[in-house]
Image (cartoon, coloured by chain):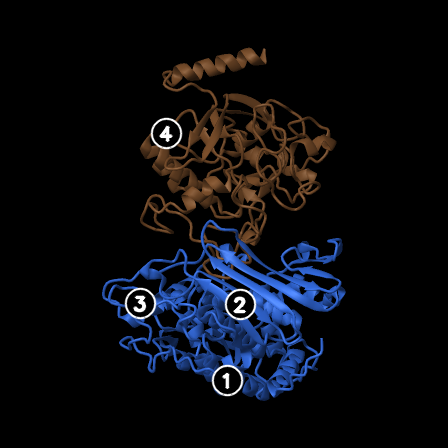
Amino acid sequence: MSNDNKSSRRNFVKQTSMLAGGLMAAPLLSRANFFSGSSDVIKVALIGCGGRGTGAAMQAMLSKQNVKLVAMADAFRDRLDDAYKTLTADDISDWSGGSGNIKDKIDVPEERKFVGFDAYQKAIALADVVILTTPPGFRPIHFAEAVKQNKHIFMEKPVATTPEGIRSVLENAQIAKQKKLNVVVGLQRHYQNSYRELFSRKDMIGDITSAQAWWNNDGVWVKMRQPGQTEMEYQMRNWYYFVWLCGDHINEQHIHNIDVINWFKGGHPVKAQGMGGRQVRKGKEYGEIFDHHYVEFHYADGSILNSQCRHIPGTMSKVDELLVGTKGKIQCGAANIVDAKGKVLYQYDTEKENNPYQTEHDELFAAIAKGEYKFANADYGAESTMTAILGRMATYSGQIVEWDKAINVNMNLHPDTYTWDTVPKTLPKEDGYYAIATPGITKYV
Amino acid sequence: MKRICLFFAILHLVVQSNAQEDFIAYTTTIPNSTVGFKMVPIPAGSFLMGSSDKEKHHKANEGPQQKVSVGAFWMGEHEVTYDEFLLFFQDANTSVNSTVDAVTRPTPQYIDLSWGMGKTGGYPVNSMQQKTAMMYCKWLYKLTGQFYRLPTEAEWEYACRAGTTTEFYWGNDSSKIDDYAWYEGNSPYKYQPVMQKKPNAWGLYDMLGNVSEWVLDQYDENYFTTIASKPNDPMIPPATTYPKTVRGGGYNEGIQMVRCAARNKSDVLWNRKDPQVPKSKWWLTDAKSVGFRLVRPVKQPTPEEAEAFYKQY
């Protein structure tokens, strides 16, 4: 189980995971320096007003701290308006579980609603804490800006779609640590009671020798092309199906399961090999992403994670993780630990399960209110995102892909500028279909 | 005597429906598929609904008992299965999540809401909102011309009891539960394919246990007081999303909830782990043991009445 990998990056990761695990004493900061404003109100800006952004903003407002949403930003006016309407509704009991509303915590007049590609900068400037919930392709840009402007951050997973995005996030994660900015990443299993209990008992299964991870289900929404849309607007609306914006479903969804394995393993894989393709996603509306991936991720200690994700209706569905050790198994979905013969050694009482999406915000805002520096999730967020990108490189190319090489790749998938008239780098062919990666032909570099 | 009453009830209905269709069990194949389901005739009648405070697991919301009458209907022999539901879920002729179409089908599930317990092969469909169950009924109505809906709470209990007045439809002996129902003591924490256990006297399987079943009614803690003035075909109309009533108990519930009179209510917590706002109007992330069963009333509504009815949900 020893490994002689001496790269500074790996050591760096170990240190950061110690910090994230709360092993480092939380330094108490001067409250005066911790907020940008003079009042006790924690000011929040929402960057990315879709369903997840609206959910995250609501959870922030429900965090029992003295918080206020003061600014909102989105590329699209209609998305922003929908979110504002939802957040200021008279009755949010159907969504929050509690009676009443959060209207008094929403203070976003017209002049603090920002629309367009540069909206984020203006909104970030007005807040103490920012919620970054746009499509993941923009996350590195927004994270860098938030760190530059000294803000505490909640950002959704995945945190990038390309290696250059990952490098940017890792770099800014370091700066965030120097500045003692709390960063929480929406890999919510880290904030879910059952997973925390399993993690604290992981030694019961001995050394982890292999693992499996699944995100198999029917797939997600699709937005059809509308008349008059520029290509940029169409891709932004239908962002799930474009690699520069989404990173493919292995990145956007399966990251949750991959992240759990990295978390329990205490690091990331060193190489990957796999296969994938597009069996049922045949329409133009499905852009360029695959509908299935199967990847072997090899860790430095020789252990292997078999990872599968599929978006094919009518097939076996499963979203879960399994860790196999020398003495037993951790079955995350069942929330238990069993020995080699299947005898239950530990069973989490699911009655005690929490809503991890709420807990993320409860803990983040409690720390901020107390002036504590407690969260540095960006490193493991970036590591797990990069692991998913590594998997995608492996399935797209059909080659063995090494971490150290992959993380230094320049994919250059993003447009050079961001306007509605910008021509994205991925374009449909004459017949309206997008080019799809072909294993054996597609290069990952 | 009971048999004679039943005979007259049936005769009456057959005459009433102009003998176009006999009030007998039938199996229908869902159009454009090979998937069928069986509907069992439940004669009109009256019964003592709820439980007395002498019943072992009685709860306050199960009384005071009330004599209730219901009209005749057919009821699904078993809970709606995933195989049946999938035809709706994947019907390319029905638009997804539309706000303009009369019949619209659910958005995909973001995560696997069967939670690995089973889908095709006779497993009950689960984790759906009441609206989703009702839209399935509406889809079936559009396809077959026959009006389907969820049972009312009263119809559900009437059908569940099948003439019995005891705690369970097999009597008061809870030790016999293994013969009749999947509950927390034998499931093992998974729902099971339908019709593995013994049916009740009217040939209905899994009325108790396996998945609990949506009914039409808004949940009313004081149901029996509310319906006291109108005990004929009672129904508490829909008013708010939560709480609605579910009956029958599920694979993960204790014996006290797997009883003819036990009543449960939906709660916003049933969807708490949906991270999006607004939350899904189709699915529930935290209601693994909720499903539904079909009813087809003998007295079919006019198309206008049917439209107006579905619109409420």
Locate residue B88: give its quadrant. Answer: top left
Q: Amino acid at mark 2?
A: Ile
User: Disc 1 designates what residue?
Assistant: A147
Locate residue B144: give its quadrant. Answer: top left
Q: Chain of mark 1?
A: A
Give the CA distance from mark 2 to mark 1: 24 Å
Within 10 Å of disc 3 (Cα), the crowding (few <14, some 14-19, many 20+) is: some
**Eye-nearest disc, 4 or 2:** 2
Q: Quadrant of the N terminus of chain A?
A: bottom right
The x and y percentages for residue B126 are: 53, 45
* Residue A420 in view: yes
Determine whether the residue tagged by mark 4 lies in a helix, strand or loop: loop
Judging by colour alone, the chain drawn in brown in this rendered image is: B
Q: Which mark is residue B33?
A: none
The x and y percentages for residue A57 are: 49, 68
Locate residue B56: give its quadrant. Answer: top right
**Eye-nearest disc, 4 or 3:** 3
Give the CA distance from mark 1 to mark 4: 63 Å
Residue appearing at x 73%, y 29% in the figure? B173
Within 10 Å of disc 4 (Cα), the crowding (few <14, some 14-19, many 20+) is: few
Determine whether the residue tagged by mark 2 lies in a helix, strand or loop: helix
User: Disc 4 designates what residue?
Assistant: B301
Marks 2,3: beta carbons within 8 A: no
**Nearer-N-terminus badge (2/1):** 1
User: Disc 3 designates what residue?
Assistant: A234
Give the CA distance from mark 1 to mark 3: 30 Å
Within 10 Å of disc 2 (Cα), the crowding (few <14, some 14-19, many 20+) is: many
Q: Chain of mark 4?
A: B
User: Disc 2 designates what residue?
Assistant: A255
Q: Amino acid at mark 3?
A: Tyr
The x and y percentages for residue B253 are: 66, 43
